[in-house]
Amino acid sequence: MVDDSRISGFYKLSIKERQKKLKELTGLTDEELASLFDPGKVDMEVLDHMIENVVGSMTLPLGIATNFQVNEQDYLVPMAIEEPSVVAAASNAARMTRPHGGFFATDTGPVMIAQIQTTEVPAPFSAKVDILLKKQELIEFANEQDPILVKFGGGAKDIRVRVIDSKIGPMLITELIVDTRDAMGANAVNTMAEALAPKIEKITGGKVLLRILSNLADLRLVHVRAVFDAKLLGGEEVVDGIIAAWAFAEADPYRCATHNKGIMNGIDAVVVATGNDFRAIEAGAHSYAAQNGYSSLTKYEKDPDGNLVGSIEIPMAVGLVGGATKVHPVARASVKILEVNTSVELAHVIAAVGLAQNAAALRALAAEGIQKGHMALHARNVASTAGARGEMIEIIAEKMIKEKMIKVERAKELLEELQK
Ligand code: MEV
C-alpha cells in the first residue's frame, strides 16, 4: 500500500516522469525499474527456464491504476493489458468510491480443492463412508507431503466425498480441502492428491484416475463492496442506467458474457502483471458465475442517498510465492508496487479492480457509449504508430477525431505538417 494512491495528472507525464514518481512512492530500486521500463533488460535465461522452446518474449504495456483504496489502505495497481481504456477506466471508477471510503473486502481464506477420481468402486456409497472414517489419517498423510505449508499455518484441513453419476457409471470423487496460504497452491494440492491416491485405492477397492485441483475455487472467494458517488457518476439517471445495464446482464446470457468479460478486463490485467495464472482465474470466475444459470459476478443497488452500491463475489486463486510471481522480474516489481503482504490481500485488491472496471464500463455504456473513449485512445495509438511522440500524439489524435479520419496515413501527413 502507499500513503495516497491519488496521483494528480499521472496520465499527462512522460514514461520517465511516471517512473520517477513511482520510485518516490514505492521505493522501487533502479534495477526493478529497469526491468519494468526496459523489457530488453529481462534476463532471457529466466524466461528460458519458465517454459519450453523459448525464442523470445511478448511484451505487454504495464500501466498503473490510481485512486484505489481497499479496506482503508491505498494501493497503486499494476495492470498488464493490450486493451486501451482499461487502466484509465479502473482509475476513474476507483476515484468515484473515495468519498465513501473506497472498497471494502472480505474473503473465505486461501482454500483450494483437489479432486481424486476413483472408478470401478464395487460399493461406492459404503466406500465413501470408509474414506470419511479414515479422514484424520488421510489429512495427516497429505500434510506430511508439505511440512513447510503446515509450518505457515496452512495444509490439508478437510476431506469430502461425493458419489457422482457419469456417462460410464458411478464415480467416487474424494475432495481434499487445503489451505494454501500465500501460494496459489496448484503444486501443493496436486502433490497431496497424488500421494493420497494409493491409499484411496486401498480403502475403496477402486481405480484412481485423475488427481488434480479444481479451478472452481469456491472455497477461495472474495467479497467486495463499494459506494460509487452518484454525483461523480453523472447523476440519478446514470445510476439508474447502470442498474438497468446490470439487470440486462442478469436476465440474458449473451449480455452477461460481455458484462463479465468487462470485469475480467481489470482482473486479468492485475493477475498477469503479478505473474499469476489468468486462465485459472478465468475458469474459476465463469464456472462460479454459471453455478445457478450463468449470471453476473457483480450486483448493483442504490443506497438511501441515491448513490450506486456495487458488490462482487468471485473466486480468486492468486498467490505471492512460487511460479512466475517469484521468478519474473516484472511480476516481482509489480508485487512491490502493490505492497501486499498476503495472497488474500492481493485477492482483495484484484476483486476491487474487477468491480471498478465493471462499474466504469456500465457507466460509459449507460451514459455516452463506449466508443467515445475508445476512439480517443485509438486515435492516440494511430498517431503513435505513425511516428508521433510526446505532445505530438495528443495534438494529432485530437485533429483526427475532429476530422473523423483516424488513419495512419492521415496521422503521417499531420505529423509532417507539424514537423515543418
Ligand atoms: C470491452 O472490453 C468490455 C465491455 O464490453 C464490457 C461491457 O460491455 O460491460 C465494454
Image (spheres, rainbow, N blue to C red):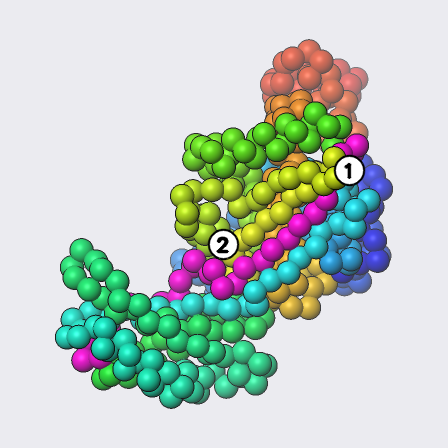
Q: Nearer the viewer, residue 209 or 363?
A: 363
Give x and y (percent) for residue 308: 70, 38
Amino acid at the residue labelled 1: Asp
Label 2 lies in ligand 1 vicinity (Cβ under 8 Å):
no
Residue at horizontal 33 percent and vertical 84 percent from the top = 133
Q: Residues within 10 Å of mark 2 (few under 14, many from 20)?
A: many
Q: Is residue 194 above or below residue 340?
A: below
In this orientation, does residue 273 appear?
A: no
Residue at horizontal 78 percent and vertical 19 percent from the top = 418
Which residue position holds label 1?
305
Instruction: Report helix, strand or loop for mark 2.
Output: helix
Which residue position holds label 2?
281
Q: Quadrant of residue 99?
A: top right
Give x and y (percent) for residue 198: 27, 82
Q: Which sits earlier in the primary sequence, circle 2 or circle 1?
A: 2
Give x and y (percent) for residue 354: 61, 46
Q: Nearer the viewer, residue 72 or 346?
A: 72
Amino acid at the residue labelled 2: Ile
Q: Nearer the viewer, residue 76 or 167?
A: 167
